[in-house]
Every structure is written in C-alpha cells, then in structure tokens.
Amino acid sequence: MSNSSIDKASVVNRYLPSRLVSREYADAFAPSNIALCKYWGKRDAELNLPVNSSLSISLAHLGSHTNISHSETGLDKVRLNNKDLSLDSNFSRKVIAFVDLFRRGQKIPLIVDTRNNIPTAAGLASSASGFAALVLALDDFFSLKLENSVLSAFARMGSGSASRSIYSGFVRWDMGSQSDGMDSVASQLDNRWPNLRIGLIKVSSVQKPVDSRSGMNRTIETSKLYPSWPEQAGSDLITLEQAIADRDFARMGACAEKNAMSMHATMMSAWPPLVYWLPESLAVMHKVWQLREAGVAVYFTMDAGPNLKLLFEACSLSVLETEFVSMEVIQPFSD
Amino acid sequence: MSNSSIDKASVVNRYLPSRLVSREYADAFAPSNIALCKYWGKRDAELNLPVNSSLSISLAHLGSHTNISHSETGLDKVRLNNKDLSLDSNFSRKVIAFVDLFRRGQKIPLIVDTRNNIPTAAGLASSASGFAALVLALDDFFSLKLENSVLSAFARMGSGSASRSIYSGFVRWDMGSQSDGMDSVASQLDNRWPNLRIGLIKVSSVQKPVDSRSGMNRTIETSKLYPSWPEQAGSDLITLEQAIADRDFARMGACAEKNAMSMHATMMSAWPPLVYWLPESLAVMHKVWQLREAGVAVYFTMDAGPNLKLLFEACSLSVLETEFVSMEVIQPFSD
C-alpha cells in the first residue's frame, strides 16, 4: 500500500465552485451492495484506491436515506436512525470530516440525518450505502450536478465500496490507474436478472473484532498468499461479467463463492490469523455444499464478518426457505 | 505436478541384491508424526516428491508395529490390528504392491501384520507410521542393512510423510532435487525439547470426504493462491529450525499455526472449496485464540481433516486439561 501524494481535499476541490450555493433541503437514497468479486486491499489509503477491480449487486430499496438541511443553532448536528449523535462519536466525526471536504471552511452549519433501512437481521455493513447517500445528498444540497462517475469517486473516498452504491443493479468498480483516482470509479452494467435472489443469513450481530480496514492491512502485511489475490480477482471479474451476460447462474454463483473463499483464505493466512467465521457460519457453509450436492443451485458469498449471503434464483426459493428459516430474501431487481 | 520418467520399482531395485535372502521373522516400529511445516503438493506423483521441504515431530511410542513372517499357505496374508484383511481390500493391495517392489517377482509369500497403537481418539493418519514401519520391517526381514536415508526415501514412495516417520524427535524432510528422488529424504534434528507437549483434540472420527492426495491435486489444479505456498513453506522451515534451536516456544508455535492456516487457506480457495474444518473445529480454534489472548502459550496445527493438535509446554498442561477435557496429551520426548 503506497500513500498518494494527493489528498482528498484537493481532488474534491477541483470539481466544486469556489463559493457553494445551498438549497434548503436535500434528500437522497443509496442502496447497500454485496460484492460478487470483492474489494480487498488498497494501493492508496488516502483515496481508497483498490488493488483490484470489483463487482457487486445493489440491494434495491435496502440502504441508506440521508437528508441534509441547515442547522439554525450554528453547529452541525448528526442524526442516525432518528437519534441525535454526539459530535464526538465515530460516526459524527466521519460524516463531518467528509462534509468538510465540500465546505472547505465555508460557514454552512448542517443537519445530516441518516436512516438505514437495512434489516437489523441482515448483518450488512452500512458504510457503503451511507457514504453514497451522503455524496448524493451533498450534490443535491449544493446543486453541484456532478457526473455519476465523479459522485462515485467521491463516495469511494469515504468508503471504498461506497463507489458502487451510487448505482442499482450489477455494478463494476474499475480499479483505475490515475494517481488522483478519478478513473477509479464504478459504473452500472446493462444486464438485469429479475429472477436473482439474495438470501441474508445472520449468524451473529456481535461487532466484529477487527474492522475491515485493519483486516485488509494485516492481511497485506503478513499473508504470504495475499500477493496472488489481485490476479484471482482480475480473472474472477472477467468470469462474472461473462456469466452475467450469459445469465449462467451456476457459473456466476461458483465464481462469487470461490472469490469470497479466496478472500477469506488470504485473511486466514495472515498473522495473527484473521478468521471472521464462527462455528455457525461454517455450519451454514456445509449445509449449502450439501444442498448443492443434492442438486439445489445455491452458492454463497461472505464479507469480512461471520454472516452469509446466499445467491440463488427464484425457482429455489421454497426449498431454501425451508432449510434456512431465518433467511431474509432480497430481490435486487424488484423494481 | 509432473510425472517422472523414473518408476519406483527401478529406483528400489538399485539398492537390493539380485536374490533376496529372508529371515524367519522381523518386527519393526515407526512413530506417527505431526508436521509443523506441512507437506502440501507433489512435484512427482510416482515417487511422492514434494514441492517443499517439511518439518515434523514424531509421537514417541505412538505409531505402527509391523511384523513380517513367511506364509506357509503359499499366499500372502495381510493383518491389521489383529484382524485378517481380504487381499482385495485397499489396505492389503497397498501393502502387497509395496512389498512387491522388494520381491520383484521372487516367490516369497509373506504374512504382514500391522498394529497401530495410535489412540482411536487421536484422529491421526496411520499411513506415515505404517509405511515407515513396513520399510523398517522389510529391511530387517531381508537383512538389507540399508542406510537411514534410503529407508526414508523408500518409505516416502509409500506415503510422502512416511519419510519422516523413520525417525523420532524433530525431523526435517528435504525436498531434494534429483529426478530419482534419492535426495528427497528426511533426517533427524539434534535438538530435543523435553517439556514440549502435543494435545490431540478429536472433533470427529467420520472419514474425511476427500482424501489428502485428492485434496492436494484439487488445490494445485484450481487454487490461484496455491502458487504462493512453496515460498511460505520455505520461509516457515527456516523460522521453525531457528525457533527450535533457540527453544523459542512462541516463535515455533506461531509459525506452525500460520503454516497450517496457510495450507488450509490454499484448500479453501480451491474449487469446489476444500474445507476440512467442522463447526466444532472452529470452536476449538476460537478457544485457542481466546486462551492466547488471556496469556496461555498455546498454538495449534491441523492436517487435512477436522481434528486439532495443540502445541504447548508442560507448564500450561493443567490449564489446558481443564479447558479441553477430552484432550489426549503426548510427550514427544518422553524417552
């Protein structure tokens, strides 16, 4: 991981008018996304530039709503899920630091109100949809009319995978090569897959012991298997795009599962070993493999946590609902 | 994996007299061994030549006793743990094929009687000690007086890790480079470590769904992370030898655990994913990590199966016996 000589603030500044003009109110929504080809490793920590391109499915109406309005008290206010947060909280500080990239010292005290409608049972991270919704809301609030690719790049600076949450459907985030990262942006694939389903299986809601950012760093610094990861991811991206274009479910599912297993493999070979799996995670994994042996077309993916996301088509829904009674089912192309 | 142009029979033949002279009876013992740096991947399937050097601890008196005597019926007889086996059984066929490398068509019908004293609770493979004991018994039975390095090479042709079971204590198997494999042999390290303990924790005795040989092949053919394995193993071997020489338990344990995790990581990134762990295995792993966080110097290693082998020193015995009530404790340097 190299550190860029370019800072976020100077990149954002290039796309903004010198003086901001603000509206009264802005509201935006961005979906959560689940990566089929994972983002795992940064080549630049300041700008969140990845070592590999990645590909995700956005989760339709599940994600973050953010609205922005003026604060009459003269102080910023940050709200999350209908509660005022302390300005010292981790969440508030991240939000305000990000908003400050846009304000650049201009005195525009704001109320930033975020509501996540991701079911608590889902075990999904909300930073991707959160930063995407914040960027969209800022764009609207300050009437910036930025292009989608710029919005994606800005969201990425908040949280890498937020670059993909600017879009619905299948989304590819190209790693890019420019030092300012402005070509490291996501775009939507044309393909739709109405029968595709995602089953969220939560095995634990305990806060993960090592956050993704630290997990990435530990893996890159200590795993001898990690250097093979970018090649794995690069080849998986090609396979996934082709499988999606061909609507070849088995190929897509197998590739997504292998990609997730390979990412976890790089973590396990880190020191100390980074194992996000719990015994219950492994039990679900073995059950998926048994079901597949029995002819059910179901695959899974997992992020840096113990929960699983099943991938299947509508035809397998009833058998899977019987096997996984607490599964929450998402239709990513429901609209 | 390349296939050598040299077959086992021609290699063995070079070390034998043209006509065998046999004794009445021979008896031999070879210990089981547990690898701290794993053998994972072959560069030659006929001769079991590995892609990396490895290092193990032999398990003192736990292993295989094999005795050989003449069969008066004119037919070979194979016995295992005091039972006659069918000559068609997998075990009998492997034993007879191996003995035939020595007999080379000479009519010497034999009774080969093997007894494993590895506790059934241990979840340990017996092919390493079994082939090592068989080689030692054949050497004695035919009064061959072969050098240890030759015995190690012959045992390796039966089962790779059997090369290490010729010796007690710490044993290093050098990968070698000759095409006939006669430099791919094990040797004993001088170092002893009387306080070292190995705790066997069996979580399942169910036959593993994929045998080690097939697992190796699948990993090499489908895992994109596997190419990094030989470098990992090479560096671990150096670390382990140094840690053993320095009697640095934390360094040895950490390296052995990382090596095992990395081997399992290569399997998990294979397709279909090769996961020997059961939920119970993962529960023991998490418990080991918790104990370590609490200051107990305990590490684990795992082979291609769900069971764990804990590594610790005598001073940690009582706390670990309380935590793992069914653990079987081995003193590898008990003699």
Image: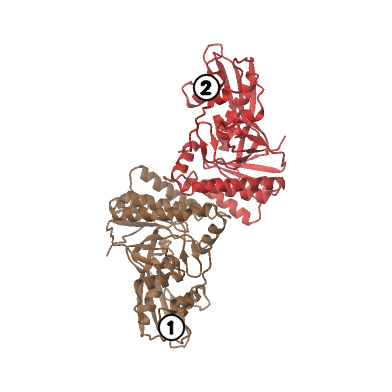
Chain colours: A red, B brown
Query: SS at mark 1?
Result: strand
Residue B207, position as x, y percentages in the image: 50, 63
Residue at 31%, 51% (x, y): give it: B249
Query: SS at mark 2?
Result: helix
**Res. A265 visible in picture:** yes
- The disc label shown at residue B61, or none: none
Residue at 46%, 78% (x, y): give it: B101
Q: Which kind of residue does numbered mark 1 sit on?
A: Leu
Badge 1: few (under 14), some or many (20 or more) residues near its Cα, within 10 Å? many
Residue at 60%, 25% (x, y): give it: A135
Quick one: A86 or B272, which is closer to the camera?
Answer: B272
Q: Determine the chain carrying the residue at label 2.
A: A
Residue A45 to residue B174: above or below: above
Quick one: A302 or B113, which is closer to the camera?
Answer: A302
Residue B315, position as x, y percentages in the image: 28, 51
Residue B242 to residue A245: above or below: below
Q: Determine the chain carrying the residue at label 1.
A: B
State which quadrant residue A118 falls in: top right
Residue A238, position as x, y percentages in the image: 64, 46
**Label 2 vs label 1: CA separation?**
83 Å
**Res. A321 visible in picture:** no
Assign the C terminus of chain B to one quadrant of the image: bottom left
Quickly name the residue at label 2. Answer: A96
Badge 2: few (under 14), some or many (20 or more) residues near its Cα, within 10 Å? some
Q: Are marks 2 and 1 on the same chain?
A: no
The answer to the question of whether label 2 and label 1 lie on touching residues, with beta carbons closer than 8 A, is no
Quickly name the residue at label 1. Answer: B110
Residue A184, position as x, y percentages in the image: 60, 35
Q: Which kind of residue does numbered mark 2 sit on?
A: Ile
